[in-house]
Amino acid sequence: MNTITQTNPTLAEKGQSLWDRAWYKFKRDKMGILGLIIVGFFLILAAGVWLGLWGGNWSDTTDDLWQGPSWEHWFGTNVIGQDVLARVLYGTKVAFEVGLVVTILSTLLGAILGALAGFFSGTWVDAVVLWMMGVLDSIPFYLFVAAVAFALKGNPYAMHIAMISTFWTTTARIIRGEVIKLKSQEFVEAARSIGVKQAVIIFRHILPNTTHILLVQATITFVAAIKTEVILSFLGLGVKDGISWGLLISESTQDILAGHFNNFIAASSFLFLLVIGFNMFSDALQDALDPKKVS
Amino acid sequence: MDILKFALRKLIGGIPLILGVTFISFLLMVYFGPDKTYELLGKNPTAEEIAEVRHELGYDQPFFKRYAHYLKEMVTLDFGHSEATGEKVSSILKRTMPISLLVILPGFILGNVIAIILGLVAAWYRGTWVDKTIMVGSVIGMSISFLVVIIAFQILFSSSYGLGWFPVRGWEVHDIPSYLYYVTVPTLATIFVALGYNTRFYRAVLVEEMNKDHVRTARAFGASPQSIMIKGVLKNAMVPIITRIMFSIPLVVVSGSLLIESYFGIPGIGKVTFDAITGGDQPILKAIVGLTAALFVVVLIATDILYRVFDPRVELK
């Protein structure tokens, strides 16, 4: 967005850049603000675990087994007397770790490869990137994760790597389309005519103009990563060390047979709240940033 | 004839895709995959015994020779025998494929049909409380994990804590009533999960079509809502709708049934895949990856032909 504010100082003074307008629009979206508050709340929960304020005792057996909810144990205790709340809080940290790592790296990868494919559309670069996207999209995802886990010999980051190497394709497709549109615009032509290098044109002039799309896409990727972690951990392909929401739900399938719902209720409600918060935030962001979005 | 020629050309165009998928799966699952040598050997094997087993497994051959061998298995549909049960992979697939289709099809079809109907209703009443209710419902639906839906529906419909009307696990289907008995809860879970995402997508597509001039003209001439929505809007929005439905087929067949079948204990292809993943049964995994890639190419071709059916302006190039 630098280009707009620099070439149109009057617009910037009036506070009319895309970001100002988006923020103005976003502020008026009640659902979006609510979503942001929910996400912020979970971020604080995760940061607290990270700083060691709470959730550190997730693996200690603190009390009798199968207690109901009480002031001491908000979500009760589990089959061996561990505090379910501490475990769910620790799972929040894991969820954010997975979400952030996967989102940042896959968005970066998608932005770079998508921009290259779009800028060189019709050439062999484009063909190779499109082929890679086609191939990755047609491998069944769970099998791909299993295969990556095999190949990495039980590396704890196999799940992350598998998600990153498949999630970038969606972002790349969108960015490719946008870059194809942008590259024929005048500012690109102007940059070319004064002899700016190709790499600079792609990454300094064109790609920054897709930031708003990347941001929206990143929120969607984050939700996908959290939801996928749960299913992968349940299948035994996900989080290996520690505890996560997916592992808690997986544990809970045994508990339910015995009539105990502590784990299931705690983990699934945390998961649901964070995901719906993110979805609401993502929707509002899309409304504010994407002029084409149908609302 | 045109369509046949077109399909053939597309099929050839799909070869790089299949090569890519098989190459990646070969690289990850076979070349860097688990070494089976010592599982087949007794205690304290001699160097000759090790070499013999490695030769049997093909480990001593060069990379591309092994890849070519895998491709040959793909083309001849002969994937060898399952390492877990010793059954032929092709006969396992033949046995489990129909079961998977029976489990997944009702949910898949209903999930799309209901979502299109909800999308049409929401688009027609755009901006009113009807639309808002449907949209809030779909965001909630989108936010609940598939796994949680399956577990919650089992508690609700199949356990003694809920209604207890349907079985928790199993698949003993001989006739229609027993089919309905086992298929209902998996189908409800599939529909529930599909509805959130599908409804949102279809509504967006339909709303976009409704903003076009021809719809305004039809309204001005006083056409009925049903005729506007179905003839004017739905039919014109078929291209993105078909794209979405067609491209979800390969994923639904493998990934969708994987969770459902392993959770409900249904002996379909998803359960076989799940067991193969957890047990590292390579012949089965190779077969499923290869076949899914082939299915993707077929879907790509079928989608292009379907475009033509719904929009005669589309040329088959």
Image (spheres, grey):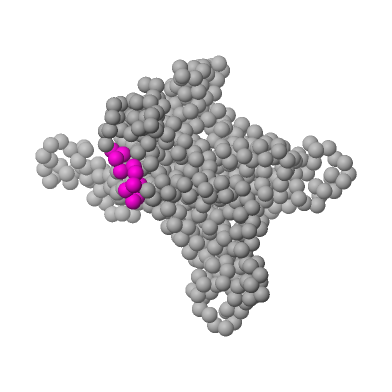
- Indicate the position of residue B138 as horizontal and vertical percent values: 60, 39
Residue at x 30%, y 49% (from the top left corner): A155
Q: From the top left corner, tell me how far across and down residue B80 is, in percent.
A: 35, 37
Residue A28 in the figure: left or right of residue B289: right
Q: Residue at x 57, y 83 (%)?
A: A194
Picture coordinates of residue A96 (x, y %)? Answer: 41, 49
Q: Is residue A128 visible?
A: no
Q: Is residue A52 left or right of residue A134?
A: left
Residue B64 % position (x, y): 33, 54
Q: Residue furthest front?
A: A71
> Which of these two is toward me, A209 or B301?
A209
- Quarter holding the C terminus of chain B is bottom right
**Which residues lie in the magenta part?**
A49-59
Indicate whether residue B255 is drawn in magenta.
no
Quarter of the image for residue B202 reads top right
In the foreground, B273 or B136: B136
